[in-house]
Image (cartoon, rainbow, N blue to C red):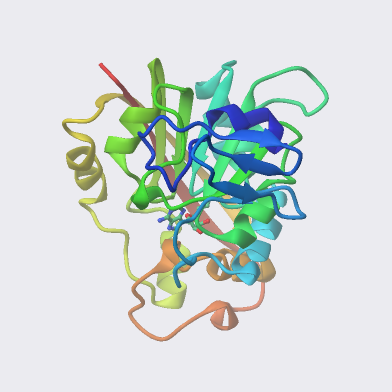
Amino acid sequence: MLADVADLLTCPQCGSEAGSPLTLEGRTLHCPRGHSFDLARQGYVNLLTHAAPANADTADMVAARDRFLSSGAYAPIRDELARRVGTVRTVLEVGAGTGYYLAGCLGPATAAGGRGLALDISPAAARRAARAHPRIGAVVADTWAGLPVRSGSVDVLLAVFAPRNPAEFARVLAPQGRVLVALPLPDHLAELRAELGLLDIEADKESRLLAQFAGHLQPAGHVDVRFELTLSAPAAQDLVAMGPNAFHGRKRDSGADDVEAGPRTVTVAVRIRAFTRS
Ligand SMILES: C[S@@+](CC[C@H](N)C(=O)[O-])C[C@H]1O[C@@H](n2cnc3c(N)ncnc32)[C@H](O)[C@@H]1O
């Protein structure tokens, strides 16, 4: 619920570092300077200071992602993230989508445990993430515009196939905190890319990530998650439809409808990179 994470939030109208905390009264967040933000009926709050941009995931994309992830197809990625998160008080996921990975890192809903803040630029994603776990609060926010989150308040920050803002990640991280970034390796879903004529993953994706973080956070090791996945045609269609981020830049005009009938086996190859403040 948003009440679990409200003390982490800052007013986007006052600037993320302005030290204007938000407090929840009833179903409205208030800042001391008089700005206020109402919770949506579904429990999330929109802290965007501009309209959601065209690249925000749509309700159809979020539904496809939800179907795909709920099948357990990427559970090994979620389980490895959960192992790396361990037991901490506060986990933030940026570009959280449906909240699948964040929920997996918070442990059973019925037991005591940490709380999770799910940020995403897509209202449809925030709506879904708000329901992913009882101790998740969901907020619509733009990672690139600055995080509406108190400095030094986050134990673990997750960015799973999502946009990154290393300067802001460093600001919101607690002194002993960690950032975990998941990114696709070059052979991730190579078979499906070949079937649909989709562009390869850039070979320099990881060196660009390291360059982006340099000067903000220190690399602190990595682990690869690799496995073979048998995908039915509907699951492959969902995997395509939940893009376009995973599949941006097509060699030819292909989409979920071009997936051939019957099952196929694909490689899942994802690197989880850790970063710390020092
Ligand atoms: C490829 S999806 C990954 C979602 C989730 N982490 C997962 O793996 O299931 C990327 C997510 O980032 C969100 N996103 C895109 N641009 C963003 C931005 N500038 N700020 C915050 N979220 C953004 C999209 O709406 C989408 O939910």
Q: Where is residue 1 drawn, in percent x and y?
A: 73, 36
Say if residue 74 shows up in the picture: no
171 left or right, relative to 70: left
Of the pair 109 and 170, the residue shown nearer to us: 170
Q: Nearer the viewer, residue 238 or 115?
A: 115
Residue at the image point whose x is 46% and y is 22% from the top:
153
Q: Specify whether 29 is left or right of 178.
A: right
**In the picture, which quadrant includes the C terminus?**
top left
- Whether 37 is drawn above or below 33: the answer is below
**The residue positioned farthest toward the bottom in the image shown:** 253
Point out residue 72 in the picture as x, y percentages from the top left corner. 68, 46
Of 169 and 213, nearer the camera is 169
Residue for point 44% across, 63% down: 50
Quadrant housing residue 90: top right
Position of residue 41 measured from the top left corner of the image (x, y, whole percent): 77, 55
Q: Residue at x 37, y 42 (%)?
A: 15
> Horizontally, is 143 left or right of 42 in the view?
left
Place of residue 108 in the rendered image (x, y in percent of width and height, measured from the top left): 76, 26
- Say above or below: 3 vs 241: above
| Total numbered labels placed on residues in the image | 0
Figure quadrant of residue 202: bottom left
